[in-house]
């Protein structure tokens, strides 16, 4: 007898599939034949996936089918023709400053929602995570990587910059000097180094990647949701606050938690 997958398919389009099972959502890149290369259509689908998350979801897992997490931007974007129905990079460059800024901002939306305070996002990364693929992994709160992972930021070698929100989390994870070296050289960062410098929370054999992510998801769900939400908000805001401001933020958050636990919350 065949056992049906209990996960609910919420979205499946343009190389992105969103499924939800209880408090865990899984966003899967579904074009392994092209090593999950990215395009504007895929970015819009990722944005739509974020908006479609049910309120019950607490953990979002991001994964890619096949041997590579994502090999980055589909090179078709660099051709004169671009993608069907989409402006090519050359078309974008010919537009006004306002139009160009608005278009890049639209693309960035696919990378912004993963750090929302009401969810914890986990990237399960195997094989190549290059350019936009690297930035998509960096968009998540946590990264569990396979031993064969290869991170690389290749935009600079193409005469571009990483513009899909990856620079901020990269500097936060590894520091300015190492982030500059990684971006300016475009070199590969492999699993052992990724774990050592803070890009990876955990490194596992490729065959154990899914199981490791399931275990981490279960651990993240063990604590009460509101406590995790408040803690994540404190940690995310810490870098932008002074020591005294962070102390005050901690007091305010703890006051909310104590009142909630005592049944005195507004």
Image (spheres, rainbow, N blue to C red):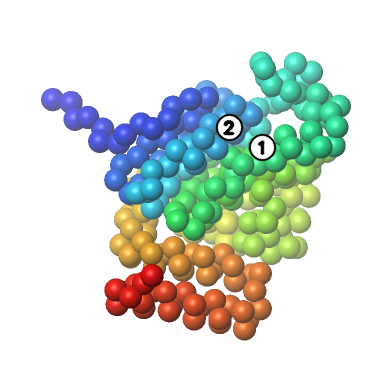
Identify the residue position indicated by label 2 in the image.
Answer: 44
Tell me: residue 65, above or below residue 166.
Answer: above
Q: Residue at x 18, y 26 (%)?
A: 2
- The residue nearer to you, when weighing 19 against 192, is 19
Q: Earlier in the sequence, mark 2 or mark 1?
A: 2
Q: Position of residue 212 (x, y in %)?
A: 37, 51
Where, by quadrant of the figure, is residue 154 drawn?
Answer: top right
Please tell me whether mark 2 sits on a helix, a strand or a loop.
helix
Disc 1 is placed on an element classified as helix
Left or right of residue 225, residue 124 in this image: right
Q: CA distance from mark 2 to mark 1?
A: 8 Å
Residue found at x 52% / y 70%? 234
Q: Nearer the viewer, residue 194 or 215?
A: 215
Identity of the residue furthest to the left in this view: 1
Instruction: Verify CB contact (< 8 Å) between mark 2 and mark 1.
Output: yes
For the N terminus, the image quarter is: top left
* Residue labelled with disc 1: 106
How many discs appear? 2
Q: Few, some or many C-alpha atoms within 10 Å of disc 2 (few <14, some 14-19, many ≥20)?
A: some
């Amino acid at each position: 007898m065949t056992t049906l997958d209990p996960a609910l398919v919420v979205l499946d389009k343009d190389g992105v599939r969103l499924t939800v099972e209880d408090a865990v959502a899984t966003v899967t890149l579904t074009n392994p034949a092209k090593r999950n290369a990215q395009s504007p259509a895929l970015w819009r689908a990722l944005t739509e996936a974020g908006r479609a998350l049910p309120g019950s979801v607490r953990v979002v897992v991001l994964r890619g089918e096949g041997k590579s997490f994502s090999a980055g931007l589909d090179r078709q974007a660099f051709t004169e023709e671009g993608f069907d129905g989409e402006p090519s990079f050359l078309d974008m460059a010919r537009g006004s400053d306002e139009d160009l800024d608005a278009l890049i901002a639209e693309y960035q939306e696919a990378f912004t929602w993963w750090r929302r305070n009401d969810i914890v996002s986990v990237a399960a990364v195997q094989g190549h995570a290059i350019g936009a693929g690297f930035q998509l992994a960096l968009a998540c709160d946590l990264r569990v990587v396979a031993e064969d992972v290869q991170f690389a930021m290749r935009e600079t070698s193409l005469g571009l910059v990483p513009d899909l929100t990856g620079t901020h989390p990269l500097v936060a994870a590894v520091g300015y000097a190492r982030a500059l070296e990684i971006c300016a050289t475009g070199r590969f960062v492999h699993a052992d180094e990724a774990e050592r410098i803070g890009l990876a929370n955990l490194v596992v054999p490729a065959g154990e990647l899914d199981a490791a992510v399931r275990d981490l998801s279960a651990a993240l769900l063990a604590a009460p949701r509101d406590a995790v939400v408040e803690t994540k908000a404190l940690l995310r805001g810490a870098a932008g606050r002074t020591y005294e401001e962070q102390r005050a933020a901690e007091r305010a958050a703890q006051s909310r938690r104590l009142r909630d636990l005592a049944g005195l919350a507004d």
